[in-house]
Amino acid sequence: MHPLVSTPSAHYNYGQRFTPCPPHAEENPMSYYKEIDGKKYDRELLELAEKLTKGQGDGRLSRSDADRLLEAVKDGDSYTDIEKDTVKYIRENFSWTDAADEHFRTEIRKWAATK
């Protein structure tokens, strides 16, 4: 028998302690999703928004930051419900410059209309 056995609910090596897999997305940093208050969001978009607002500038998303977020949203050929929810969350929970907010809203509307 092979010394490493893998099951969907657990990973263990003979002679080592049983370790269950993390049951929730928020506990798994490799998940595509981040769960906030029981709702799934796009982890990559949230982490990008956090990165763009930390450590430099005044903590607001600038127009160039908005362009980077737009590129991340457009990485696929569709605009999923989770991406829509994530964009809404970012718009409501992060500070934006007026120019960035207007630019982002205009561009995301134009792009979403083609999907």
Image: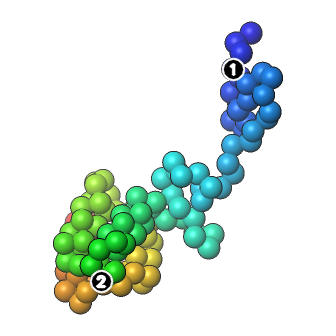
Image coords of residue 52 (percent x, y) = 32, 69
Residue 6 placement: quadrant:
top right
- Give the residue pinned by disc 2: 58
In this rendered view, identify the residue nearer to me: 107 or 43: 43
Disc 2 crowd rating (10 Å Cα; few below 14, some 14-19, many 20+) is few
Instruction: Give the amino acid at mark 1.
Output: Leu
Is disc 1 placed on a helix, strand or loop? Answer: strand
Let me know if residue 83 appears in the view: no
At 57% from the left edge and 64% from the top edge, which residue is drawn?
35
Q: Amino acid at mark 2?
A: Asp
Q: Quadrant of residue 4?
A: top right
Find the distance from the CA under tag 2 to the CA under tag 1.
50 Å
Residue at the spot x=41%, y=63% of the render?
Answer: 47
In which image quadrant can residue 114 be found? bottom left
Q: Horizontal and vertical percent for residue 63?
A: 19, 77
Disc 1: which residue: 4
Measured as percent of width and height from the top left, residue 70 is found at: 25, 67
Q: Is residue 40 left or right of residue 20?
A: left
Which type of secondary structure does the marked residue at label 2 adopt?
A: loop
First in residue order: circle 2 vs circle 1: 1
